[in-house]
Image (spheres, rainbow, N blue to C red):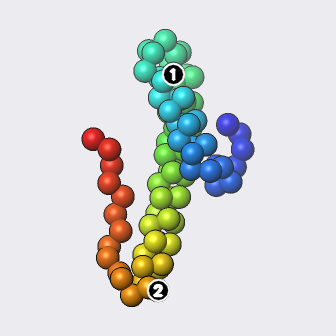
Amino acid sequence: MEENKQEISFEEAMNQLEEIVEKLETGEVPLEKAIQYYQEGMKLSKVCSEKLGTVEEQMQQILNEHGNFEPFTVQEEE
């Protein structure tokens, strides 16, 4: 997980984030390692958020170019 987070795909970042969450949910991770996982998870979360923001901006631009602008929002799963 040392690679530059901006260069990984959204899917890769989400997969790594899911792995971290699974490890932390076990409750069997030493405190120091849990903190490292948490920090890494926050970085991955930021990367995912930035990538989604970029896609949202691109979608708004595409819609503007075609004259059918409607606000584009990403709905979270419940």
* Residue at which label 2 appears: 65
* Residue at which label 1 appears: 23
Point 72% across, 44% down: residue: 3
Q: Nearer the viewer, mark 2 or mark 1?
A: 2
- Amino acid type at mark 1: Lys
Reading the chain from its start, which is encountered first: label 2 or label 1?
Answer: 1
As drawn, the label of residue 73 is: none
Report the residue that reaches farthest toward the left: 78
Number of numbered labels in the structure image? 2
Task: Pinpoint residue 56: horizontal percent, then vertical percent.
Answer: 44, 67
- Amino acid type at mark 2: Glu
Is residue 54 shown above or below 66? above
Residue 77 shows up from this direction: yes
Label 2 and label 1: CA atoms lie apart by 44 Å
Task: Pinpoint residue 42: horizontal percent, then vertical percent.
Answer: 49, 42
Asked if the residues shown at circle 2 and circle 1 are in contact, with their CB atoms under 8 angstroms apart, the answer is no
Label 1: which secondary element: helix
